[in-house]
Image (cartoon, grey):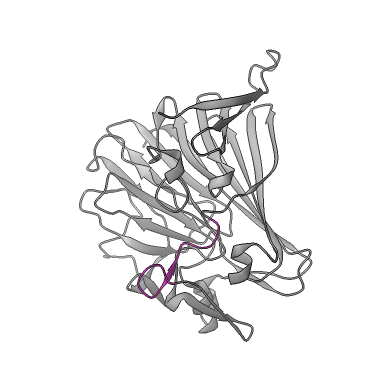
Amino acid sequence: MRRWIAFLMIGLSGIHLSAGEVTVVRESDSGWEVFTLQQGATIVRVVPAAGANAYSIVHRGIEFFRIPGELVKLPGVGYGNPILYPMPNRVGDAKFTFEGKTYKFPANQNSNFLHGLVHSEAFKIDSYAAKDHAAELTCSLQFIPGFRPYELFPFRHVFRVTISVRDGTVRWTYEVDNTGGDRNLPFGVGFHPFIIYQKSREKTYLQVPASHLMESVHQLPTGNLLDLDGHPLDARQPRSLHGYHADDVFFGMTPDKPARVIFRDANRSITFWASAEFTHLVVWTPDHPYFGIENQTCATNAHNLALQGKQDVAHLQICPPGEKKTGWIEYCFELAVE
């Protein structure tokens, strides 16, 4: 049986009734600290030591993520909302070349490398705070010699993530800090939520107001864009996920037109807002009781697409030395209104 020890709660002053709350509990089986961020009816649980995974979101009493039965199973990509960095999803043949140098990774999906380098790493806790109307946690990873991901991606920098919870909304803000670096840093950021169906799949509707679908071969985009008119995956208008099978990359997402999931028979919805950096969206709808709506700052296999001269559709992010790059996504949980 799981045992919980040693907790700290901040932000309960009794003066600001709308203040957020941060609770820190050490789970004895894993030894990890679990941060619970709460504002109003929205509760988020995060484990910095397991990839800074916000593995549980409860809004108005309903859990929206697939959570592990045992917390020690959390690292990796299978529960919650893993962070994909510095390459979202697949890297073809588990390697890419950038500015004349080739970087190789251990193949973990056939000949490809999948899901980046940070989803199982222990993030450093930078700060956490309960504020008026919000609860917030900031974590970071330093890519420096001696850090395993640095040996594979030897760009000296800091990757930082802030998770901020307001009532009904959860925001992830990333920062790629290359102020201590000495060369261009090529990266992408993605988020891979494992969203559980609320009641039936048939009554779960998806809307993706993208401009195009990316043509793919074995889940690797070719760089060609497909017209959505008449395409079986066109979801610019709400589509039931019953019979909708996708593991594909949508292109042309913009901040003013977010993706949305509506659970009609549960009267709930999630809207996937994102900053302008997030031009791509992966939709993954396996035959499981969960699915993924994955905001990405670049295409799958973006490093290799950019090398092929297809940077316009790859949208590979480049952080020059001495600079920082940032962006954000936000999930908004609401009663469904169409």
Seen at 65% across and 71% down, the residue is 154
Q: Is residue 174 magenta?
A: no
Seen at 27% across and 32% down, the residue is 265
**Between 255 and 80, which is closer to the camera in this rendering?**
80
When the figure is inspected, residue 329 is found, relative to residue 179, above or below; the finding is: above
Residue 317: tell me if it is visible: no
Q: Position of residue 333 (x, y in %)?
A: 46, 35
Whether residue 110 sits left or right of residue 115 in the image: it is: left
Quarter occupied by the N terminus: top left
When the figure is inspected, residue 266 is found, relative to residue 100, above or below; the finding is: above
- The overriding secondary structure of the stretch rendered in magenta is loop
Residue 231: tell me if it is visible: yes
Whether residue 18 sits left or right of residue 251 in the image: it is: right
Q: Position of residue 257 (x, y in %)?
A: 48, 52
Q: Position of residue 335 (x, y in %)?
A: 40, 30
When the figure is inspected, residue 206 is found, relative to residue 308, above or below; the finding is: above
Start-end of magenta stretch: 107-118
Q: Residue furthest top?
A: 14
When the figure is inspected, residue 12 is found, relative to residue 204, above or below; the finding is: above
The image quadrant of residue 46 is top right
Seen at 55% across and 57% down, the residue is 118
Quarter occupied by the C terminus: top left
Disc tally is 0
Q: Is residue 112 magenta?
A: yes
Q: Position of residue 304 (x, y in %)?
A: 50, 78
